[in-house]
Image (cartoon, helix red, strand yellow):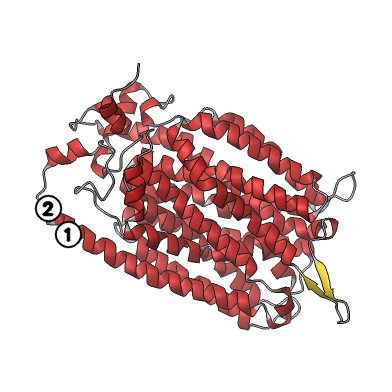
Amino acid sequence: MALPLQSRDQDDAIAFVGEHGQYVDPKIEARAVRKIDLFFMPTMILGYGLVYYDKAILGSAVLFGMTEDLDLSVVVDASTDPPQVSTDRLSWATSLFYFGMLAGLYPLTLILQRFRTGRVLGPLVIIWGLVAMLTATVTTWRGLYAQRFFLGFIESVMPTAYMSIVSSYYKQNEQALRQSWWFSSTGLFTIIGAALNYGFGQITGGSLKSWQYIYLLAGAITVLFGVFCFSVPDSPIDAWFLSHEERVAAVERLRSSQTGVRNHQMKWRHILDCFKDVKFYLVAVCMAAAYTVNGAVSGFGPLIVSTFGWSTLESILFQFPIGGVVLIFILVTGYISSKIRNVLIAQLILCSLPVIAGCAIIWKSTWSYHAQAPIWGYTIIGFFGPVVSLIITLGMSNVAGATKKSVMAATIFVAYCVGNIVGPQLIRSQSKARHYPELWLGLIICYCILIVTAVVLYIYLHRENKRREAVEFSTEKRDELAFKDLTDQQNPYFRYVL
């Protein structure tokens, strides 16, 4: 039976718990949250870990013969000693993944909003795994270009799905910790991936190259994960692992945050609201500036480390420390944000400083045989991880309305793609002797832009909260508006987190 137009226009939660607030037993609420954590957090950590590992494989694969097998490096001047080599093809192989993500983000994210979550994620993740496995069959750099583009297109749905899930299942003050849990898998899988790639590097027999085995394993695990994704519920309303009273508690407790739960109707006025919202652009600039580091590190990290005189396998092992920094400090900043209110932007700025310092150390230190200083600089660059995690939380905790949340999630990762596309293009193999000055100077400039933009965002959100606090407060009216699927700008009871 079709819902009346007015019902479809409102949040799904209003039909489940009604317009007026009701008492929630703290014990039942705690039990519901614990079950939600136990289902989603391991699932999301594995899922986004596979996304990150899948992208970062390229950095190790080039050390295992992919560069030569697919002609990813080209001698541009044979008269020098050693010959001058261009890695522009490798740069474009890295960047084309993100062009694919750019193409897929808005359509796939809006499809995810329109249809049930499990029915969208399941097929897409299985296709993603199959495309990843097909990398082993690529024989030319042109084929790799096509494969990377389609891989990025399919994978684009994963981060936006996770961001939307967290904003639909958790209160504002809980989101920073949960966003940090799944995003910390970038650090965890940097370590796991490095260990796996080190193991594959020991393979000398068989009909395939080491890099081909890596892609086959990653793709096979992803296909299995895709089968599991069919079980992902659409919202707390139909979470199959909760009892009825736990589902009521899981939905009702979200009323105070005013962020809503779920609505399958795409609303053009929400999209317009996004593009009229100042913070929409400020968050996007922050994300684009922050992720230029990853664009360079994920595709070229092991290659850059090998420049310091370390062997292929040793270069891969040096991904452990940077992965550890990413993992630990994403979790630390998420935990601090869950305990102390309005410290997101302050932590973001503080974590940006080690990234700037790391870039300067690598650039200006001596690149002698087994040099220590650039390795330390490379390690502390890992603070880009908590910076990005905090930006995700800032973006998703500060919007309401189902369509607006979807568009914000997609836009955050459009900016993520822009940063990842720009990063590899800053690497010029011809300037290797001068320590890639374009790369490190470019990254330092990007992080200075990030800090200034974050300060502007803080001032904007603080002033907006002050303006809203002057509005006459009504608990009854606040409860009534909570599940009307209003955007944050339409709802005077919405409060921004800083």
The single residue placed furthest to the left in the displayed view is 472
Picture coordinates of residue 479 (x, y %)?
A: 18, 37
Picture coordinates of residue 160 (x, y %)?
A: 48, 45
Label 1, secondary structure: give it. Answer: helix
> Mark 2 highlights which residue?
471
Query: Pointer 1: residues within 10 angstroms few (<14), some, or many (20+)?
Result: few
The correct choice, above or below, for 441 with respect to 11 in the image is below
Callout 2–callout 1 Cβ contact below 8 Å:
yes
Position of the C terminus, as image quadrant, is bottom left
- Looking at the image, which residue is at 59% across and 76% down? 440
- Looking at the image, which residue is at 43% across and 60% down? 284
Label 2, secondary structure: give it. Answer: loop
> Mark 1 highlights which residue?
467
Instruction: Determine the image quadrant of residue 3.
Output: top left
Q: Which sits in the foreground, 374 or 228? A: 228
Query: What is the distance, in whole Å, between disc 2 and disc 1 at their CAs?
Result: 7 Å
Amino acid type, mark 2: Val
Picture coordinates of residue 202 (x, y %)?
A: 83, 52
The answer to whether one can see residue 84 in this image is: yes
